[in-house]
Amino acid sequence: MTTPITFGKVRSIHIRPAVNSDLLGLIALDEEVTGLAKRKYWKETFARYGARRRLPRFFLVAEHRGRIEGFIIGEVRAWEFGEPPCGWIFAVQVRPKTRLKGIGTQLFKTLGDAFRRAGVEKVRTMMARDNHLVLSFFRSQGMMAGPFIELEAALD
Amino acid sequence: MKLQKASSFALYAVLELAGNPANQLSGTEIADKYGISAHHLAKVLRDLGRAGIVEAARGVGGGYRLAANAKRLTLLDVIQIFEPIGPQGAAEDDPELATDAGCALRMVLDELDDHALATFRSITISTMLKLMARRPWAGSPRYAKPSRKAASRR
């Protein structure tokens, strides 16, 4: 249990597509959160989802006073099982010190707008059920369990 | 899935207090709104007070207010005061574990419990208030209001 805290909103946050010059900031932010420096991974991710892609892929960053405070990555996926294409979010991150100030919400809303413009009506994601932090974030954005159940099996 | 009465009453009270942060509400006011036993709710509110989730104001016009942070307080925080949630683990001498069928059944039940645990843990009181404001169930026959007679049996 925690005591009440007053949460302020971060104003003048700029949500925009990631550009090449954001890469170092993104790598640093991810390292701050995960403790791992994944330069190759971020270079490849940026190449696939970064700016000027023709495919409906979106890599958005939240910039505040010249610093990257968060990002979200998603794409429109042709969903199997007879469902129409949907927006799919597969990464979201906000700098720990600036969390609970609305940055994640702004990223989520901006990506939702981009998905809507791309012609889809639903957004989906998937994560480990013990990832309480991110699960709570998506719940707070109004996401609920969808019509699918994720299943897996060990390949003998 | 059904929650025990005490858990449901506690959640009604917490949501009511979180939705009215400027006001203190009495147990009777909350009980009247939900058509539940004021006596039972009083006991639930005492348990919530002991857990630091609500606090009582004394004096004329006294009532309860939320002491916890609605953005941090989860459904699980409230429910597990009143009942266990999630896989409970079988006792060593549980006959269920003595057979393959029993173990397989336990595994399936644990899967359901794991999902319930993750769901309750991921939804905060603040998220519940947003859900209540959105009312995505509006028009769904599954969530149609019960008749007065059925409601009065609670």
Image (spheres, coloured by chain):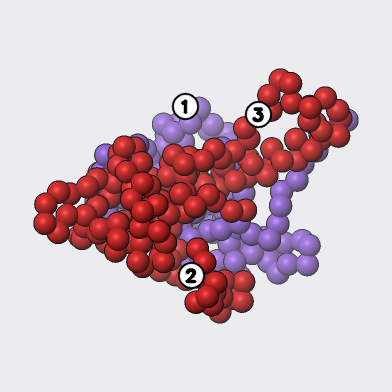
Chain colours: A purple, B red
Secondary structure under the numbered disc 3 in the rendered image: loop
Question: Of the residues tagged 3 and 1, which is closer to the observer?
Answer: 3
Q: Nearer the viewer, residue A76 or B81?
A: B81
Q: Which quadrant of the structure image shows residue B113?
A: top right
Circles 3 and 1 on the same chain = no
Q: Nearer the viewer, residue A51 or A9?
A: A9
| Amino acid type, callout 1 | Gly
Mark 2, residue position: B152
| Amino acid type, callout 2 | Ser
Q: Is residue A120 left or right of residue A33?
A: right
Label 3, label 2: how far apart the Cα atoms are: 37 Å
Secondary structure under the numbered disc 1 in the rendered image: loop
User: Which residue corresponds to the image point at 47% horizontal and 49% vertical from the top-left?
Assistant: B7
Mark 3, residue position: B89
Q: Residues within 10 Å of mark 1 (few under 14, many from 20)?
A: few
Label 3 chain ID:
B
- Residue B124's x, y, as percent? 42, 50
Circles 1 and 2 on the same chain = no
- Residue A47's x, y, as percent? 58, 47
Label 2 chain ID:
B
Label 1, label 2: how far apart the Cα atoms are: 56 Å
Q: Residues within 10 Å of mark 3 (few under 14, many from 20)?
A: few
Q: Nearer the viewer, residue A61 or A53?
A: A61
Mark 1, residue position: A35
Label 3, label 1: how far apart the Cα atoms are: 34 Å
